[in-house]
Amino acid sequence: MSTFFDAGTRAELEARLERLTPDHRRRWGRMSPHQAVCHLTDSFTAVLGDRPLTTPRVPWYVRTAFVRFAALTLPLPWPKGVTTAPEMDQEDGGTPPEDFERDRDRLQAAMERFAARGGEGLEPHVVFGELTAGEWGRWGYRHTDHHLRQFGV
């Protein structure tokens, strides 16, 4: 299982992020590459405690251990078009894109801070709630990978 807390895996994600340009075409979803960078930054800074969130109303079955296990452990691609918290939704309350390079640098800094925590001292996930260090590592990898694949990188 790939985990964000493995230095080699994280280096691979960072290299893919470096290849992402504002001109990449999306394969699914509504976000542009620049919006995806801001969305990922918002996601990392939320669990780091820098960005306050309100918990969205999610169906009870999403908060179950089975769904968390399936989303973070099974080697299946994440579904496309899943609704996110308003504070991370680029069409609602997410951080608006400014300068692509500067925003990508902010994402890389947030990723480094998240990695340095090693899954400890993080805020509960907006959908999954409290996660173990291992689950945080899987979430960090899977969420970043999902949005990089959205643009073919």
Image (cartoon, rainbow, N blue to C red):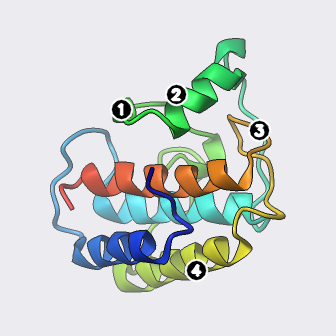
> Crowding near pointer 1: few (<14 within 10 Å), some, many (20+)?
few
Q: Which kind of residue does numbered mark 1 sit on?
A: Leu
Earlier residue among tags 3 and 2: 2
Q: Is mark 2 on a helix, strand or loop?
A: helix
61 relative to 106 in the view: left or right: right
Where is residue 23? Give x, y as percent. 16, 67
Residue position for label 2: 70
Q: Which of marks 1 and 3 is in front?
A: 1
Tell me if label 3 and label 2 are in contact, CB under 8 Å: no
Among the two numbered marks 4 and 3 on one chain, the one whose residue lies closer to the N terminus: 4
Residue behind mark 3: 129
Q: Identify the mark nearer the N-term, 1 or 2.
A: 2
Which secondary structure lies at badge 3?
Answer: loop
Label 1 residue SS: loop
Indicate left or right for 33 with 118 as reference: left
Judged from this view, the residue extending furthest toward the front is 1
Q: Which of marks 1 and 4 is nearer the N terminus?
A: 1
- Given this view, does label 4 or label 2 mark the residue nearer the observer? 2
Residue type, numbered disc 2? Ala
Write down the quadrant of residue 118 in the picture.
bottom right
The kind of residue on which mark 4 rests is: Glu
